[in-house]
Image: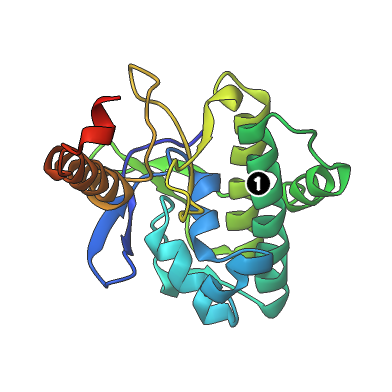
Amino acid sequence: MIAAATGLVLRTPDGTPYLFDPGTLCLDLLTAGGPGVLARYDVLHEPSDLANWLSLSRLRLDPADVRVTSDDVQTARRLRDALWQLTRACARGETRRAEDLDEVNRAALPAPLVPQITPTATRGWQLPADGAQALSTIARDAVELFTGPHADRIRECSAPDCYLIFVDVSRSLRRRWCAMEACGNRHKVRALRARRNANEAPMDTSPDSAR
């Protein structure tokens, strides 16, 4: 599981940027749209879109060093949608669909990116590379996640209006929010307002209230 905590910069509905760390590479892909109601967030339409997204993900691939085709874009969209279905099923304790598992396995078939150690002792990749290699690396990361010790740590953000999914790698295993700066802070504000409203509610002093 490629879990270096880098994170992606997302934006709240009002445009405020915040850092979201889903915990592993394959879940990075879920920020690029998805099936059903998530289609409105889709950013993968052209090869340049996928190349740009790969540069923002944990892979940090320079678009100039990755050859991406239209077929790669379609593979990425199918893989992303399958990962949405699988992660939701895991988070909710539901049965995982065979067709989604097959999609991940298909994407994992090509040779993955070749890892290398950079002069600064960080992970790098042998470049140039192609889109299929990058997607295979993402799919293989998903295989590790779903079959490894973190499979039962896949969580949905607790906010009812948030779709984001993450792996809880916190020490306490009590992570609830996609990010404290986003949904966590909104929850705190709502809870504070509720307490204030409760404290400010007028006391009923009518005679009937004492009966």
Identify the residue shown where x is 42% and y is 38%: 23
Vertical comparison of 136 with 148: above or below: below
Report the residue that reaches farthest toward the right.
98
Identify the residue shown where x is 24% and y is 44%: 194
Disc 1, SS? helix
How many tags in the picture? Answer: 1
Vertical comparison of 72 with 134: above or below: below
Q: From the image, tell me which residue sits under label 1.
A: 139
Is residue 119 visible in the rendered structure shown here? no
Which quarter shows the C terminus? top left
Identify the residue shown where x is 68% and y is 69%: 72
Quarter holding residue 11: bottom left
Q: Along the line of sight, which residue is nearer the eye, 11 or 141?
A: 11
Identify the residue shown where x is 73% and y is 74%: 71
Q: Along the line of sight, which residue is nearer the eye, 164 or 104?
A: 164
Is residue 117 visible in the rendered structure shown here? yes
- Residue 196, position as x, y percentages in the image: 14, 43
- Residue 45, position as x, y percentages in the image: 60, 81
Give the amino acid at mark 1.
Ala
Q: Along the line of sight, which residue is nearer the eye, 183 or 67?
A: 183
Vertical comparison of 15 with 183: above or below: below
Quarter holding residue 69: bottom right
Query: Dot 1, how many residues are within 10 Å of its Cα: few (below 14), some (14-19), or many (20+)?
Result: many
Q: Along the line of sight, which residue is nearer the eye, 187 or 152?
A: 187
**Is residue 31 left or right of 72 when viewed as pictured?**
left
- Residue 123, position as x, y percentages in the image: 37, 41
